[in-house]
Image (spheres, coloured by chain):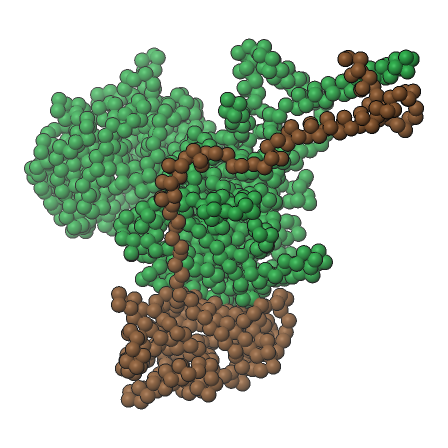
Chain colours: A brown, B green
């Protein structure tokens, strides 16, 4: 048990300075194997592993001078198609205990294990078959696997770009993991073409999402009161433009004006003998109109 | 004034119908007092108490008690009050018999769940007449039936005590409450009627124990079965002494085998035993020995006995013989003589008689007549008198569980000349009458004729498809396993079918997981083929029960095929594919999460295998709070031979932590919803793309502590978490917490938005929130030139496995009502703006414009926003009285609202069901694409004719004048 302290301390240092550095990864895999073991031997160990790490983190706490917080780790496991799950990497997060007893995970870091040759072959096979690459994490990080494992899958062909690009979104609620959204870092074409990556290493992006609070419903009691006092103003119809108000008068007026203009244009022709050509059809009508008007007068 | 008239006119043309039901009758009490109108009071499984007219079956009055307030007992007291005991014996109410008004209500003390028993003394003494005795929740109460005041109460609760009968012997001053203690001891309390004092308590153990409940046979003899159900135990008790007498059933009825049961009935001196093969009627003879009186073969139903004269008691025996039912009313004392013997013919779609209640009356010749109220297997209610069915009520329609629609047949060409002439004459006559009405020349008779014509307007109720798609068949499935087709024109039942495989006689005691789905909708051969619907059901609540798969013709209601599935039935998934005969592909998921494809044709398997890599499904475990997504992965492991069976592979899972979240509701988009436009142009000429995905699901969880009633927790302990989840990848697209919010949660998902309703404990009000989700990955498609040239990625297929770039807008508003159900209107093309249809607590349907639930509402919208139609922000959603779709009507106990698009884009058909059924047609943005039904075509025609005439006349005149002018 003695050696766990420096190990965890080391882990923290690793966490703080660089999370995705490959040099440290191999070390963490060893830790992983020691502390958590591979699948099957995990169920009992972590319970012990975490309390033993407490003093180490406490010391860390003192240095940090922040409130209660300690480090927790949980394993990411993966499966190729129908294969069994094997460890693929480790998530490390800081567990923060609030004064009211709530616990939250912060500062999530992830270190991916390098792909072994067998895994590489399995992944290639997945790409050829266009099958699913599945990963899982425990649903409770303090007491894995909690109520069960959180699974997420993606068609393997979505992942390769230059290297294997992956994107994790971990939704947490305290120390529980609700869901793991896993997929390619960018878009995934459909239909999916077969494409092998140039570099067989994972390029991981991780995001942790906590709860988001809803906006409060707006309340307008003051404005309502204000509206009550100034009710008459509120009742007033909105100002309309001149055109929208008087269009019904303006259109007939326009028509009359136009009519008058045509009449004025026709006026000189009145002296001429009526009905000259068939092509001037509007003119005789206008003439008749003026004639009749004149007679009525 | 003109506006009012317009509104009325609009209403008169709205087609709607409303049908009132009560549900399956549990108890019936006849009221034969000398009030003018004869009526029967019934209580039903839908928690309704109603008073029905014995002549017509109409409802005089009706009360729908809440969902959590089931009626346990009903009786009549003082000849004028209906006494009901409900909520497991904790609420006693008295209703006025003539008009159903609540006279009083008493909430009784309750310490532990127990049987609820009601004893109303029948013979009126001087003081006793006004007392009723109630046992419920471990307490015995004496309550004044005049004002509901508790006269005394007595706790009769000890651990393991099950009081089964409360009765009086010969209307004495004492009361007996008898029961079993741990099913081993017989306990009798002798209680004073005056003050509830226990006068005597007698107990006696029975070594082999009792089974089930006991039955009071006569004033001092009870019967029960022993624990092994092999012998009948008669319990004789008188003051202080209890004696058991055990009789082996095989000794007296040697032929009886299998499981036996005592039928709970009141036959004064007789009792019946139900065996696998028959009903056996027993009596205690004069020396106290059990004798078999009669044996009836199944299916036979006996009524309780009623007394017609002093010392003469009768009961009814109903025996089935194919479609006929023999009713015999026999005397209790002398089983050989029959007071009545009738045979009635029953519709085969009603099933067997399940319950019978009889009532006697005095005939015109002063002899006794009997009428019988029959409760049928399909939950309908019939009244039989003088060998005839006087009336029948389709009360199965009060428990609709699922519904779908079907188009009507296409109108066929080639109508006979005689028919045309007839209809032409009718048409002329109709128009003449209408003309008379318009000219105010119509006599009252004519007006009545016009009204009738309007009601029966053949246009509405025709059995053919119409141009606007208003006429359809609504196919509903009821709890009893009966399928009804209702015409949207007037709500009449076009056909009904009681599924044989779901009947009790076929060994299906309680059908469950009833699902109705469209099976085949022929388009290519619509003239020759008729559509069909699929009914999937399971007998009993057991997971491993195998399902029943039936296909019914939608036009005729004939059963096309029915089969028992070789596997269990957990979930049904209709797929968006049809095979070459236009049968829809369905996946049935069994309890091993293996999927079975239907129809089982090579064609369907081809289609399915082609699409298999793009089919995903998810399952929800509400109790554990786990959601899991699956895809298909090869053939079933159990049965490799079966090529229609597929294995599922788990792809994703979401686990809600048990200590902080409890699944409350899951809402999805409708399968058949049409979205007209993917983009939304917002005020500043910008475009936002809606995130439209068929796999978008809304999930709401609440804190487990706040799962109880509103107000049971503090706001700090209550929260609601809303999720938007993609069901294919299991991605959480959005997650938001509402602190201080509590269920019940109702939600509706449509297009790219979700609206949900809950209670806000901090604000002490109900609240509605809206979330709209927009796709950012396509946001750069704004260049008009690119769009015109087709250089955009809007038509390329989108994979949900791409990283979603979504933006979410949300807003919350206060809402005055609590909500029972919520849905959204659907139209044929999705152009018409949407309305939310809300089933309110008052059982009305309220239409609320979606515009009010726009997250982009601001307190002072800019001019451009106003033009876009954004309403200034208010904290509360307005409830406009005119927007009640149901107007003045109520859809009692509303459980569901279904919207069906009509062919006419502006119009949605709305069908609401609960205890009542309601149908109407609404146009959320007014009928902009059609003329109203009462549009005056004649006036239009006359105007056109007049105009043409005027043109001709003026033309002639002008010609003449021109000629004259030229001659000048």
Rendered residue at 47%/67% (across/down): A181
Residue B13 figure quarter: top right
Q: Is residue B697 above or below residue B61?
A: below
In the drawing, does residue B750 fall left or right of residue B889? Answer: right
| Residue B185 appears in view | no
Q: Which residue is at the front of the view, B500 or B932?
A: B932
Does residue B286 appear to the left or right of B260 in the view shown? left
- Residue at (35, 12) in percent of width and height: B364
In the rendered image, residue B451, in percent from the top left (x then y), is placed at 54, 19
**Residue beneath the point at 44% across and 58% down:** B723
- Nearest the viewer among A199 and B356 is A199
Quadrant of residue B932 in the image? top right
- Closer-to-camera residue (B412/B836): B836
Give the x, y percent position of residue B727. Answer: 50, 60
Task: Tell me if residue A128 can be seen.
Answer: yes
Q: Of B173 and B751, which appears nearest the observer? A: B751
In the rendered image of this protein, does residue B299 appear above or below residue A192?
A: above
Q: Position of residue B849 (x, y in %)?
A: 49, 41
- Give x and y (percent) for residue B243: 12, 42
> Which residue: 77% across, 12% down?
A296
């Amino acid at each position: 048990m003695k050696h766990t302290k420096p190990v965890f301390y080391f882990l923290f240092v690793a966490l703080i300075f660089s999370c995705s550095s490959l040099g440290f990864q191999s070390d963490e895999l060893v830790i992983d194997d020691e502390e958590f073991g591979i699948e099957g031997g995990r169920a009992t160990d972590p319970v012990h592993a975490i309390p033993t790490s407490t003093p180490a983190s406490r010391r860390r706490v003192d240095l940090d001078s922040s409130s209660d917080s300690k480090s927790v780790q949980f394993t990411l496991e993966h499966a190729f198609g129908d294969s069994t799950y094997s460890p693929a990497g480790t998530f490390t997060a800081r567990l923060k205990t609030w004064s009211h007893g709530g616990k939250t995970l912060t500062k999530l870091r992830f270190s991916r294990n390098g792909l072994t040759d067998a895994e590489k072959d399995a992944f290639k096979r997945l790409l050829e078959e266009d099958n699913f690459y599945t990963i899982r994490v425990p649903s409770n990080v303090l007491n894995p696997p909690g109520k069960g494992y959180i699974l997420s899958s993606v068609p393997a062909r979505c992942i390769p770009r230059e290297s294997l690009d992956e994107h994790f979104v971990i939704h947490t609620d305290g120390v529980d993991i609700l869901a793991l959204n896993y997929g390619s870092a960018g878009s995934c074409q459909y239909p999916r073409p077969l494409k092998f990556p140039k570099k067989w290493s994972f390029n991981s992006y991780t995001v942790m999402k906590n709860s988001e609070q809803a906006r409060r419903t707006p309340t307008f009691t003051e404005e309502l009161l204000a509206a009550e006092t100034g009710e008459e103003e509120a009742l007033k119809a909105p100002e309309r433009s001149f055109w929208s108000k008087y269009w019904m008068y303006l259109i007939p007026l326009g028509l009359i004006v136009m009519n008058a203009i045509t009449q004025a244009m026709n006026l000189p022709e009145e002296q001429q003998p009526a009905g000259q050509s068939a092509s001037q059809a509007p003119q005789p009508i206008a003439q008749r109109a003026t004639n009749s008007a004149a007679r009525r007068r | 004034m003109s506006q009012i008239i317009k509104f009325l006119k609009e209403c008169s043309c709205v087609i709607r119908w409303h049908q009132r039901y009560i549900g399956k009758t549990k108890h019936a009490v006849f009221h034969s007092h000398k009030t003018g109108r004869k009526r029967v009071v019934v209580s039903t499984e839908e928690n309704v108490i109603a008073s029905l007219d014995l002549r017509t079956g109409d409802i005089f009055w009706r009360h729908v008690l809440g969902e959590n307030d089931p009626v346990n007992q009903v009786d009549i007291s003082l000849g004028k009050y209906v006494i009901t005991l409900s909520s497991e014996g904790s609420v006693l109410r008295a209703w006025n018999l003539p008009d159903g008004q609540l006279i009083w209500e008493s909430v009784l003390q309750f310490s532990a769940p127990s049987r609820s028993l009601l004893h109303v003394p029948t013979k009126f003494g001087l003081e006793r007449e006004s007392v009723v005795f109630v046992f419920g929740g471990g307490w015995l109460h004496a309550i004044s039936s005049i004002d509901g005041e508790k006269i005394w109460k007595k706790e009769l609760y000890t651990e393991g005590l099950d009081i089964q009968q409360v009765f009086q012997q010969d209307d004495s001053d004492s009361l007996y409450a008898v029961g079993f203690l741990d099913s081993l001891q017989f306990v009798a309390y002798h209680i004073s009627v005056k003050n509830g004092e226990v006068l005597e308590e007698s107990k006696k153990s029975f070594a082999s124990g009792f089974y089930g409940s006991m039955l009071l046979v006569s004033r001092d003899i009870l019967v029960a079965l022993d624990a092994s159900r092999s012998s009948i135990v008669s319990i004789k008790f008188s003051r202080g002494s209890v004696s058991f007498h055990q009789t082996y059933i095989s000794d007296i009825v040697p032929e009886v085998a299998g499981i036996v049961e005592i039928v709970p009935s009141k036959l004064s001196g007789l009792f019946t035993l139900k065996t696998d093969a028959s009903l056996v009627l027993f009596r205690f003879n004069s020396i106290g020995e059990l004798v078999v009186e009669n044996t009836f073969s199944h299916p036979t139903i006996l009524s309780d006995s009623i007394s017609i004269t002093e010392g003469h008691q009768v009961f009814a025996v109903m025996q089935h013989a194919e479609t006929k039912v023999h009713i015999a009313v026999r005397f209790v004392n002398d089983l050989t003589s029959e007071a009545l013997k009738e045979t009635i013919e029953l519709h085969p779609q009603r099933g067997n008689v399940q319950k019978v209640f009889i009532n006697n009356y005095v005939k015109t010749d002063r002899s006794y007549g009997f009428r019988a109220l029959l409760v049928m297997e399909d939950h309908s209610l019939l009244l039989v008198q003088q060998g005839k069915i006087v009336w029948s009520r389709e009360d199965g329609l009060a428990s609709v569980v699922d519904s779908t629609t079907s188009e009507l047949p296409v109108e066929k060409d080639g109508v006979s000349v005689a028919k045309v002439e007839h209809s032409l004459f009718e048409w002329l006559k109709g128009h003449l009458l209408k003309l008379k009405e318009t000219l105010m020349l119509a006599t009252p008779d004519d007006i009545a004729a016009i009204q009738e014509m309007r009601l029966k307007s053949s246009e509405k109720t025709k059995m053919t498809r119409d141009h606007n798609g208003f006429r359809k068949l609504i196919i509903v499935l009821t709890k009893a396993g009966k399928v009804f087709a209702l015409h949207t024109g007037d709500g009449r039942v076009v056909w009904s079918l009681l599924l044989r495989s779901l009947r009790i006689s076929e060994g299906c005691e309680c059908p469950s997981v009833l699902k109705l789905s469209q099976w085949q909708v022929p388009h290519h051969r619509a003239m020759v083929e008729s559509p069909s619907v699929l009914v999937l059901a399971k007998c009993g609540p057991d997971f491993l029960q195998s399902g029943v798969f039936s296909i019914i013709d939608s036009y005729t209601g004939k059963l096309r095929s029915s089969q028992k599935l070789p596997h269990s039935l957990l979930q049904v998934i209709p797929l968006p594919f049809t095979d070459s005969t236009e049968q829809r592909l369905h996946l049935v998921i069994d309890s091993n999460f293996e999927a079975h494809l239907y129809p089982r044709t090579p064609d369907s398997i081809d289609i399915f295998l082609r699409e298999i890599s793009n089919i995903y499904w998810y399952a929800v475990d509400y109790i554990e709070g786990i959601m899991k997504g699956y895809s298909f992965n090869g053939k079933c492991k159990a049965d490799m031979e079966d090529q229609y069976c597929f294995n599922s592979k788990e792809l994703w899972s979401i686990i809600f932590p048990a200590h902080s979240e409890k699944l409350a509701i899951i809402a999805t988009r409708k399968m058949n919803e049409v979205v007209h436009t993917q983009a939304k142009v917002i005020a500043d000429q910008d475009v936002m793309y809606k995130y439209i995905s068929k796999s978008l699901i809304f999930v709401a969880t609440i804190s487990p502590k706040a799962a109880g009633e509103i107000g049971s927790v503090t706001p700090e302990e209550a929260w609601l978490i809303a999720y938007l989840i993609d069901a294919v990848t299991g991605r959480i697209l959005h997650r938001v917490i509402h602190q201080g919010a509590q269920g019940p949660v109702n939600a509706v998902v449509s297009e790219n938005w979700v609206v949900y309703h809950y209670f806000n404990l901090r604000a002490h009000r109900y609240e509605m929130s809206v979330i709209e989700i927009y796709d950012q990955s396509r946001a750069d498609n704004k260049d008009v030139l690119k769009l015109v040239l087709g250089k955009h990625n809007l038509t390329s297929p989108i994979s949900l496995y791409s990283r979603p770039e979504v933006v979410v807008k949300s807003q919350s508003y206060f809402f005055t009502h609590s909500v029972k159900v919520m849905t959204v209107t659907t139209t044929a093309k999705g152009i018409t703006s949407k309305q939310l249809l809300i089933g309110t607590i008052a059982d009305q349907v309220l239409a609320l414009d979606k515009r009010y639930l726009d997250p982009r509402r601001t307190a002072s919208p800019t001019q451009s926003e106003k033009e876009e139609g954004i309403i200034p922000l208010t904290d509360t959603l307005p409830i406009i009285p005119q927007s009640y779709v149901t107007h003045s009507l109520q859809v009692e106990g509303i459980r569901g609202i279904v919207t069906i698009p009509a062919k006419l884009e502006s119009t949605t058909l709305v069908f609401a069901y609960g205890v009542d059924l309601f149908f109407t047609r609404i146009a959320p943005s007014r009928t902009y694409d059609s003329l109203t039904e009462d549009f005056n075509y004649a006036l239009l025609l006359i105007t056109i004719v007049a105009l043409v005439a005027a043109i001709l006349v003026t033309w002639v005149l002008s010609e003449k004048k021109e000629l004259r002018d030229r001659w000048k």
